[in-house]
């Protein structure tokens, strides 16, 4: 990757960052989308971000640290893929059932039995939405969580050409280096996997219902299956730039990742507060108190390693867990 690639912005002439895979490079000076692969050209949309000051306020609130500084703002290009498919299937399933009978003396006797059941049918309209990052380099936890959140949110986007882009924003836009064809293959793989799992669940469910005339189904094993996908339909959006705010300090005390359009906390890592420690510690002491009846009331709110050791020894697993929680330096919260 180099800015000396010879490519220049079609609008302002600034040098562009281009790698061999780049499809679109967004000018970091004026925000103009330069299509390196003209043959793949389409509209680009952007989900507008909440202003930075609001993001800073939210981040401070979430981790309770008032010194949180300016975030790194990113716009990650995504394709939103809507995939649909039917499947027809047939399968042979071994179901274990349990049958209980009451004998003449009133005693209940239970027996297990294996039965083989054939099932078959059609599953229609299996639909999923897959947000797929249009970048080869960006994988990992953050993007995974972001994708999950995107698929459950309703996003409002506008055309990039109609967005009010200032210089700082255009510098945050990552270039696009996956084509719609690449994305189609990725989405198709995911969808066929999901379809297969869904059909297998359906097969197991049906087999248990069928086997229930022999007794109460306990477990089911698919012995043979044929699953044939049909009517596969994949619709891929034009690229959408999704905003993200990332806050992190140098000492690693905290990390906050917020969705850029509604400030949803996607990742929160923060030092455990005193109150939080105290709560877990008292839980630990309480458990050990019940177990041993030794630790007195006055020690509940004191944070003392010797006491925590006593609590650990006395209270067993329950208090050990609580105390371990209380001593943990960093709490990681991931919500979607
Ligand atoms: Zn430019």
Image (cartoon, rainbow, N blue to C red):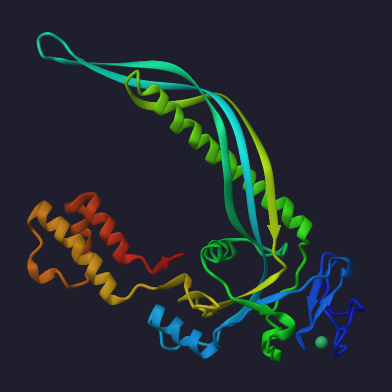
| Among the 4 quarters of the image, the one containing residue 150 | bottom right
Q: Is residue 153 left or right of residue 102?
A: right
Classify 25 as above or below 236. below
**Residue 189 shown left or right of residue 316 in the figure:** right
Residue 82 relative to residue 4: left or right: left
Q: Is residue 291 left or right of residue 189?
A: left
Residue 263 is situated, as x and y percent measured from the top left of the image, at: 49, 78
Residue positioned 40% across, 69% down in the render: 330
Q: Residue at x 65, y 76 (%)?
A: 75
Quadrant assignment, res 308: bottom left
> Where does the image place residue 278, in percent across and percent down from the top left?
23, 71
The foreground one among 89 and 26 is: 89
| Position of residue 102 measured from the top left corner of the image (x, y, whole percent) | 17, 14
Indicate whether 89 appears above or below 322: above
Asked where in the image residue 170 lies, by quadrant, the reply is: bottom right
Quadrant of the image containing the N terminus: bottom right
Of residue 210 and residue 264, the one placed in the foreground of this image is 210
């Amino acid at each position: 990757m180099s800015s000396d690639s010879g490519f220049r912005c079609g609008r302002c002439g600034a040098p562009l960052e281009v790698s061999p895979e780049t499809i679109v490079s967004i000018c970091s000076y004026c925000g103009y989308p330069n299509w390196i692969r003209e043959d793949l050209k389409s509209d680009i949309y952007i989900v507008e971000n909440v202003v930075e000051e609001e993001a800073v306020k939210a981040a401070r609130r979430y981790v309770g640290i008032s010194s949180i500084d300016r975030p790194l703002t990113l716009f990650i290009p995504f394709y939103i893929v809507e995939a649909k498919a039917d499947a027809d299937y047939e399968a042979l399933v071994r179901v274990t059932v349990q049958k209980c009978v009451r004998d003449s003396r009133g005693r209940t006797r239970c027996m297990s039995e294996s039965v083989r059941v054939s099932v078959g049918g059609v599953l229609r309209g299996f639909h999923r939405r897959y947000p797929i990052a249009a970048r080869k380099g960006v994988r990992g936890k953050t993007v995974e969580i972001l994708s999950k959140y995107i698929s459950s949110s309703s996003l409002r986007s506008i055309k990039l050409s109609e967005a009010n882009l200032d210089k700082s924003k255009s510098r945050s836009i990552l270039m696009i280096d996956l084509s719609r064809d690449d994305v189609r293959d990725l989405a198709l793989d995911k969808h066929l996997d999901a379809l297969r799992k869904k059909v297998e669940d359906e097969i197991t469910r049906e087999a248990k219902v069928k086997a229930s005339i022999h007794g109460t189904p306990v477990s089911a094993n698919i012995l043979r299956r044929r699953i044939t996908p049909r009517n596969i339909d994949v619709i891929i959006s034009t690229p959408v730039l999704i905003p993200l705010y990332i806050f992190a300090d140098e000492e690693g005390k905290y990390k906050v990742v917020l969705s850029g359009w509604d400030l949803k906390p996607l990742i929160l890592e923060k030092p455990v507060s005193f109150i939080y420690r105290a709560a877990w510690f008292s839980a630990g002491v309480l458990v050990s108190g019940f177990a041993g009846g030794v630790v007195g009331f006055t020690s509940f709110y004191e944070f003392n390693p010797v006491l925590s050791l006593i609590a650990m020894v006395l209270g067993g697993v329950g208090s050990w867990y609580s105390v371990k929680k209380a001593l943990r330096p960093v709490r990681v919260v991931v919500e979607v």
